Image: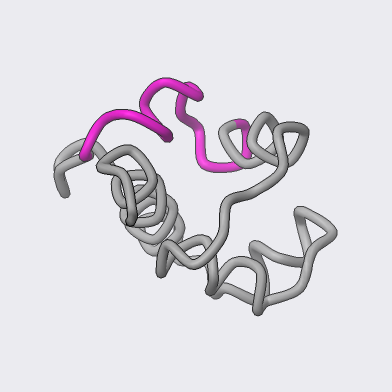
Amino acid sequence: MERAHEKALGQNIRRLRLARRLSQEQLADQLGVTRQSVSKWESGQSLPEAATLLTLADLLSCTLDQLMREALSEADS
């Protein structure tokens, strides 16, 4: 059963990635992971590792709290 914060995380990764006009492949390259990993995070099938979350927040110009807990609106992206 997926928790609300896990769903918000995937949605936020996707929204922020698209706002920065990055493909899944481009984001994956910057993080040193596969495109499939990014896809799984966005769909809620898996979660990034803790160290990856820190880099992800930096790349997407947000805080960890924003990335993981808040359902960001289009205006927040």
Indicate the quadrant containing the N terminus: top left, top right, bottom left or bottom right.
bottom left
The residue drawn where x is 16% and y is 49% is 74
Give the magenta part as a residue range: 58-71
Q: Is residue 34 magenta?
A: no
Relative placement, left or right, of 10 versus 27 is left
Relative placement, left or right, of 56 versus 10 is right
Relative to residue 6, is residue 41 depicted above or below? below
| Residue 33 x %, y % | 79, 64
| Residue 73 x %, y % | 15, 43
Relative to residue 22, is residue 2 depicted above or below? above
| Residue 16 x %, y % | 39, 50
Q: Nearer the viewer, residue 1 or 68?
A: 1
Residue occupying the far front of the picture: 1
| Residue 10 x %, y % | 40, 55
The residue drawn where x is 71% and y is 65% is 28
Q: Is residue 59 magenta?
A: yes
The residue drawn where x is 49% and y is 67% is 45
The residue drawn where x is 26% and y is 30% is 70
Q: Quadrant of residue 53?
A: top right
